[in-house]
Structure formats: C-alpha cells, structure tokens
Image (cartoon, rainbow, N blue to C red):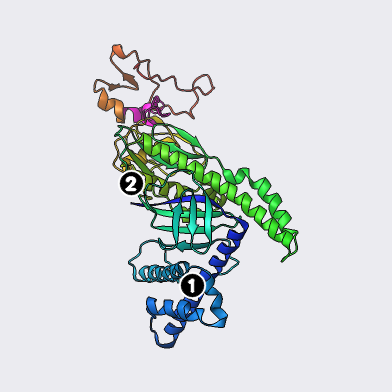
Amino acid sequence: MQLRYQFRLDPTPGQRIALTKVFGCARVVFNDGLALRKQAWETDKSRIPTGELARRVITVAKRTPERAWLAEVSVDALQSAIRDLDAAYGSFFASVTGKRKGPRILPPRFKSKRDNRQSVRFSRNGFRLRGERLNLARVGDVRVRWSRRLPSVPSSATVIRDAAGRFFCSFVVEVEPQTLPDVEQVTGVDLGLGHFAVLSDGTKIDNPRFLRRAEKKLGKEQRDLSRKTKGSSNRAKARVRVARAHARVADARREFHHQLSTRLIRDNQAVAVEDLAVKGLARTRLAKSVHDAGWTQFVAMLEYKAALYGRQFVRAGRFEPTSRVCSACGVKDGPKPLNVRVWTCGACGTALDRDINAAVNVAKAAGLAVTACGAQVRPERVPAPRGETGTHPKGLLSGGLRREFPSFRRGGSQLIAPPSFGLSQYPSPTRHRHQLPAGGRPTKPTTRLPAA
C-alpha cells in the first residue's frame, strides 16, 4: 500500500525565494491550461489532449516574452501542474457520472497567489536524496528534519508551504503491511464531545478540546490583526501570527489522534466505529465542538492503520439505535435527550451508562462479540408493575400473581392465601382510596407483598 511521509523543511532564504518562484510558475501553468480547456469547451465542445495542452502552456509559452520566465524553474514541476489539472477534471467527471462515490466534486477553479496553501509536486526526475538533504531541481539541497527513516524509495515529493509560512515535504512511498501479533481483545468505540471516545470495556478518554483551550490567545491575535491597516507589512506579520496559533492547535490535535489510534490498533484485534454524519452535526449549534474534536481525521487514521497492521476495522451503520438499545437484553427503549447520561432498562432492570452502552452496541452492530467487562453496568431491583403492587387488588388478581400462584382464591370481600406466604389481610376490593373509614381520616392501604 502507498503511504505519505511528511517532514519539515528548513530552506535557506535563497531557497525560499526559489521555491516561491516554483509555486508561482506551476500556478500560472495550471491556470493557463484551465483557461484553454474552458475556452475549447465553450467554443465547440471539444477537449484538448494532455500532450497538446502541455506543449501550448509550457513549450510554446517559454518562447514568448510574457512567459519567458517559465524557463527559470524545473520543467518537471510544470508538467506536474498539467497532471494535476487532468486529475481534477477526472474527479469532476467521475462525480457527475456517478462513478465516484461521496459528495459531489466541483470543477477545477483558478488558483491564486493569495491562497494560504501553496504546493508543487516533483516526480522522480525532479528530486533525489543526497545523504540527509533533499535535492530539488533548480532549487538545491534543502535541509530536512528527519524524524524517521523512509521504508522505501519515494516515487514523488510534494513541497508544501502552509499559511504560517512553514515548508514541508510529503513523500509517497510503497509500504508492505506489517502484521502485528494476534490478540483476543476487540472493542467498540463511541465518539462524543463530553468524552472524545468511550470504549466498550468502560474506558473513557477525555476530550482535549484544543481549540477551546486556545480561544483566548486566538482571540487576542485576531483582534491585533483586525486593527492593522490592510496592505501593510504589520498586517502581514499579524496574519502569520494568527496562522501559527491555528497551526499549533491543528498539530496538537493531529498528534493526539495519532497516539490514540495507534494504541487502539495495537491493543485490539478488531475495532468498530459508528459511521457518524459529521457534516450534518457540523450544521448544528455544536458545530465548533464537532470540528474541534476532528472525528473524521481520527477515523481515517484508524482505517489505514488497521489495513497496515493486519487488524479488522468495521464501520457500524449510522442508523443503528446504539443509544436506545439495552446492551444486556437487547430491548429497544425510546429516544432520550442528551442530558440523560445514565438510564435503567425497563425490561431487565440494568443500569446503563449511555456512552458505554452505545460503545457495546456499536461493536455488536459491527458483528464483534463483546461484553461490557468493567463497565458501569449493574442489575438493580426491578420495581413491581402497577398491577402487582397491592394497591389495586383487582389488578393483582387479574395480573401475574393469579397466574403464578393458582392457590389464591377470592373469599367474600377478602383475599385468602396459603399460610406459608405470610400475607396479611388485604383490604376490601370495594374500598377505594377516596372513601373514608369509620374514623373519618383517610388511610393508606396496608398491603404487603409476599416475601421473596
């Protein structure tokens, strides 16, 4: 399988200028190719082949005074821009025809030099690894902060500059799956906002809330940015400070997701997660908290790590009533508001923690055999139904006790039971609670249930 390994770059000031020039040239080639294709489609509904398009916007354009500076950068980066345009159109047409699943893909748009994220891709002809440095064509040897070894020779290298002005290089490498030793434990994961994740064994993982914790600093930096004059250098510096504050939040969230997903995949043979409608939840009043949690990124990490290390990853259906079904007996209860965190099953009397019960049901819905081991699930005394509490003798006789104890019989205005039950005399079935006894004061019935 193919994976991306991303590392931080430390280019020199001269290399920063050269990379910025590469970004600009690749952007111009992409925009010129997009303009030609749109013009051809609007003229006679024709499509320019990729080779002809590359000849017009690269080879022929270099000979013109307006595009002569395209010769100052590597042609490999310019050709990658044309391939990116082809891929964008391919995704758009596959989405329109229904071949591509998921949300609809819009047609490619023109790129701008004011975009926060700039990137350019080099194929094997445009880069090479020289010791601890990365050699890029027409740029030079760039220092790389290697945090780990590449498992194989990369097939491409994408240089990225984010909104905070940081440079990264993303390598595409071929990785062989590494099967971990089998373990017996399987788990279901219930994602939430109060706790980021609750496992079917009762483990609760707190939600770090990285964005909420950084809101005070982000607000200060944003207010400083709003006070700067548009177009000034001070405003550009303030914008970078805001971008760096957001980058720290995103980096901390990504690191948390990596550590938690690796631990779950390492310790469990199978992991089940509910297929949440994140886009729908992001349109509610909980939108900020939903985006802060980053469920989609976390589930994507679980999925690819399970495939990499030989584990089973299952998505439970989003319409499964995981919060309404009792994980002990399987009886479906009614809907519950979000403020109800613990509820008791009316069928079996089990006290259920809402999140742990949902995690167990997620695993069961995915076909995993799990139990709520160590979870906060306990049986409680079942309250007797209304017909068996003794306050309504008619219902009592017509209810469960008549079926369970056939020796009960009606004797005049009293109930006569075998002496072994130790029952006291029941009040007359014709006396109601609103009637007054001889003393003139209402009294409560003195009915007792048989000893268990």
> In front here: 76 or 182?
76
> Which residue matches tag 2?
307
- Whether 389 is among the magenta residues is yes
Dot 1, crowdedness within 10 Å: few (<14), some or many (≥20)? Answer: many
Q: CA distance from mark 1 to mark 2?
A: 35 Å
Residue 180 in view in this figure? yes
- On the image, the x and y values in percent for residue 164 come to 61, 55
Q: Main secondary structure of the magenta part?
A: loop
Kindly report which numbered mark, 1 or 2, lies closer to the viewer in this rendering.
Answer: 1
Query: Considering only vertical position in the picture, is 96 above or below 372?
Result: below
- On the image, the x and y values in percent for residue 36 come to 46, 81
| Amino acid, disc 2 | Ala
**First to last magenta residue range:** 373-397
* Relative horizontal placement of residue 78, taking residue 178 as reference (left or right): right
- On the image, the x and y values in percent for residue 333 come to 38, 41
Q: Mark 1 or mark 2: name the one nearer the start of the chain.
A: 1
> Which residue matches tag 1?
30
Please, what secondary structure does the residue beneath circle 1 have? helix
Residue 358 in view in this figure? no
The answer to the question of whether label 1 and label 2 lie on touching residues, with beta carbons closer than 8 A, is no
- Whether 424 is among the magenta residues is no
Residue at image coords 71%, 66%: 231
* Relative horizontal placement of residue 32, taking residue 181 as reference (left or right): right
Q: Quadrant of the C terminus?
A: top left
| Amino acid, disc 1 | Phe
Residue at image coords 48%, 43%: 147
Residue at image coords 75%, 60%: 228
* Relative horizontal placement of residue 234, taking residue 318 as reference (left or right): right
